[in-house]
Image (spheres, helix red, strand yellow):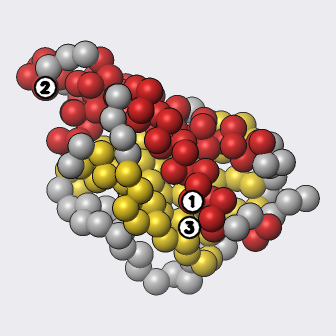
Amino acid sequence: MPTIDSISEDIFQETMNRAVQDVFRTMLSSSANLVHGSGAASSDGAPWKHPVDLSGAQIVGTVGFIGDISGLIYLYFSADFSKFVASQMLGMSLPEVEASGDEVVNDAIGEITNMTVGGFKNQLCDQGFPCRLTIPSILRGSNFSIEPVSGATRRTYTFEVQGHHLVTDLLMKNSD
């Protein structure tokens, strides 16, 4: 059975970069430029910090993947960036998005996350690591971080999109 260790950091970074680029180009007509990537070893229990400041209100989309390698991918958006994404995706003005409420933003971020993780999953499948997706979930909050389960491998990538930061947080384990 294939393992996480058999996939190089370059492949994970390129796979995530391509997935994010494709979705943002297709859905928002925007480029997403990779500005920081960080492969991390298994969690040692030490507090973990994102490579960019994520203080303030955040909307976080997450989708899991299950197969020979299983995991979760979190996409972190600031509140302002998430409204911008919803506006661009839905062809609405920012005031229209704000008047429509959190559900419109949640739906847009859920769809962007689902498409991004789907692109990542398809590339994993192409490399011989078949898997399937879970349904998207949305987290809202501020000043929080996700802690991985014991033995998980974490990789984070930061992208710049129209002056906003998007952080992708990839947590993986080999399936038993």
Residue flagged by tag 3: what amino acid is it?
A: Arg
Q: Residue 54: give its label.
A: none
Instruction: Please rate how many residues cluster around mark 3, counting C-alpha atoms within 10 Å: few if below 14, some from 14 to 19, many from 20.
Output: many
| Nearest the eye: 119 or 79 | 119
Residue in the picture at 36% in, 40% down: 31
Nearest to N terminus: mark 3 or mark 2: 2
Tell me the kind of residue under disc 1.
Gln
Residue 140, percent from left and from top: 30, 45
Residue flagged by tag 2: what amino acid is it? Leu
Percent across and percent down for residue 18 are 55, 45
**Furthest residue in direction left, as rendered:** 95
| Residue occupying the point 55% across, 75% down | 40
Which residue has dot 2 on it? 94
Secondary structure of the residue carrying numbered label 3: strand
Residue lying furthest right in this view? Answer: 1
**Could you say which is closer to the camera, residue 88 or residue 176?**
88
Q: Nearer the viewer, residue 29 or 61?
A: 29
88 vs 130: above or below: above
Residue 38 image point, x, y percent: 49, 71
Q: Is mark 1 on a helix, strand or loop?
A: helix
In percent of width and height, residue 13 lies at 57, 59
